[in-house]
Amino acid sequence: MGVGERIKKVRKQKGLTQVKLAEKAGISRSYLADVESDRYNPSLTTLMDLAHALNVTASCFLDDKEIDFRNLIQLCKKNDLSLDSLGELLEISSKELAHIKSNKLPSEGTMFKIIDHFDCTRDYIIGKTDSPDNVVFEENSISASGLIPKRPEKLGDPIELINIPSTIAAHFENMNFTEEETEEISNFINFIASKRKK
C-alpha cells in the first residue's frame, strides 16, 4: 500500500470527502486526488498538513517496511552512544525509542531532535539514502548539502544563513521535472531550512 492509499484510507475512516480534507489541509482537491492515487508523492510539508487535518501523525502514512534505522545506529556507534543513551541525551521517551527499535517512525518532534543532533537529513536517518546530506525525491537522491544553514559551533553563536534561490532548476540525467515537482522540491528545501533557523 502506497502513501496515497494510506491517506485515502485514513480520510475515509474519518468520514471526510476529498473536498473537505483538501480544504482543511490547504491544498487543491485535484492534487489530493493525484496524491491518493499515488500519481504524485506529497512533499513533507503537505504530508504534515494532511496529517494535521486528519488529526494523526504523518508517520502513519509511511510503510514501516521501508524504514531502516541502521544509519542511526551507526551514527550512535560513531559517537559512543547506544539508542538508550541517545534517548536520555535528547529526552526521547521510552515509547518513542521502542518505535525506533522496531523500525517504526517515532513522532515528528523526535525525528527533528535526532536530525538536528546528528546534522543530517531525515531520509538518511530512516535509511532511504546512504549519504547524510541527501534527500530522496521520488526514486532519486538529491544532495541537500549547502542548501541548509550551518549549525553554530556553540550555543549562542549566530547561525550562518544562506541564500535559498527563489527558483530551482531540478533535473537528473535524461530527466526533467515539471514546474509542480520543482515547486515541491523548493518547498521541501525551505521547510528543512526553516527548521534549522529556529
Image: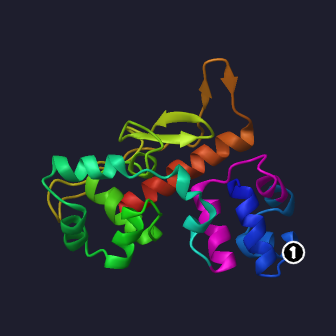
Residue at the image point whose x is 72% and y is 65% from the top: 7
Say which quadrant the N terminus sits in.
bottom right
> Please, which residue is most extreme toward the top here?
174
SS at mark 1 in the image: loop
Q: Is residue 93 visible from the viewing direction of this image?
A: no
Q: Main secondary structure of the magenta part?
A: helix
Q: Is residue 92 visible from the viewing direction of this image?
A: yes
The residue closer to the viewer here, 146 or 50, is 50
In the image, taking residue 22 as reference, residue 171 lies left or right, namely left
Q: Amino acid at mark 1?
A: Thr
Residue 125 position in % (x across, y down): 39, 51
Which span is picked out in magenta?
33-55
Residue 89 position in % (x across, y down): 19, 70
The residue closer to the viewer here, 12 or 16, is 12
Residue at the image point whose x is 65% and y is 40% from the top: 182
Query: Where 84 sits versus 173, above or below?
Result: below
Residue 9 position in % (x across, y down): 76, 69
Residue at the spot of label 1: 17
Q: Quadrant of residue 84?
A: bottom left
Say which quadrant the C terminus sits in.
bottom left
Protein image colouring: rainbow
How packed mark 1 is, by other alpha carbons closer than 10 Å (few <14, some 14-19, many 20 or more), is few
